Image (cartoon, rainbow, N blue to C red):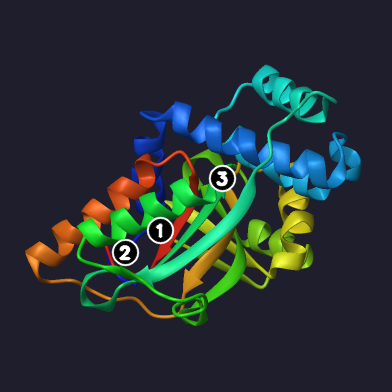
Amino acid sequence: MSGHSKFANIKHKKEKNDAKKGKIFTVIGREIVMAVKAGGPDPENNGKLRDVIAKAKANNMPNDTIERGIKKAAGADNADNYEKAVYEGYGPSGVAIIVETLTDNKNRTAGNVRSAFTKGNGNIGTQGCVSFMFDQKGQILIDREECEMDADELMMLALDSGAEDFSEEEDSFEVITDPDDFSAVREALEAQGIPLLEAQIAMIPQTRVALTNEKDIRDLQRTLDMLDDDDDVTDVWHNWEE
């Protein structure tokens, strides 16, 4: 879409994250715990843990911090116990919002998420009320300036590795995969030394909603900011055309 750069949005998000490394590292730490408990502490035998480690590195988490998190999660005395909870709802003008959380207290998290929607003049809906408007896909973003490989070569590498789609933005490349093929494609790119800006399973909106009313924009931004500040929230997906 002309004038719309996914990478610009990602950079904006990462700049915010850089100012809140504590929040991001907390979230990734919980994801490490979940991955280790589900599949063990050896990344070679635990694909989910490999994906979380890739996410950690994309967010500049130090290797020793990652290793400490894995060892702690694998310890017999580790009492951390997190549950995944997903909330769906609407912001102003029908903007669809999906909130993914990892929490050790569902009541606290549910109250905080509901408050974020309410204060932005939105409302929580039932499970499935907006997720049908999104496609779950593997999404890999590559900084064009950091990538030494020719665009056509990169595209062929991605597609040959199992990617569904490859697109070029002014400042980035985007690789889309089926969720089941995400790890294989990510690992194939990493094996060729491709620096990944973002690598995640994403909820990609099928259509987007543009907001023109300034109050609606302020209200939606308030909801998104409150969710972004909540340590229990791991991801927020929406179909607002920013």
Residue depicted at x 21% and y 56%: 119
The residue closer to the viewer here, 80 or 187, is: 80
Mark 2 closeness class: few <14, some 14–19, many ≥20 residues within 10 Å: few
Q: Which residue extends farthest right?
A: 45
Name the residue beneath numbered marker 2: 4
Q: Is residue 69 above or below residue 3?
A: above
Residue 193 visible at all: no
Specify the quadrant of the image occupied by residue 110: bottom left
Determine which residue is flagged by label 1.
Answer: 6
Q: Nearer the viewer, mark 2 or mark 3?
A: 3
**Label 1, residues with CA under 10 Å away: few <14, some 14-19, many ≥20:** some
Q: Secondary structure at mark 3?
A: strand
Which residue corresponds to mark 3? Answer: 103
Label 1–label 2 contact, CB within 8 A: yes
Of the 4 image quadrants, the one containing the C terminus is bottom left
Q: Is residue 202 left or right of residue 68?
A: left
**Which of the 4 image quarters holds residue 181?**
bottom right
SS for dot 2: loop
Left or right: 203 as drawn, with respect to 180: left
Q: Position of residue 196 (x, y in %)?
A: 60, 44
Q: Amino acid at mark 2?
A: His
Residue 214, given in percent of the width and then of the height, sits at: 8, 63
Q: Amino acid at mark 1?
A: Lys
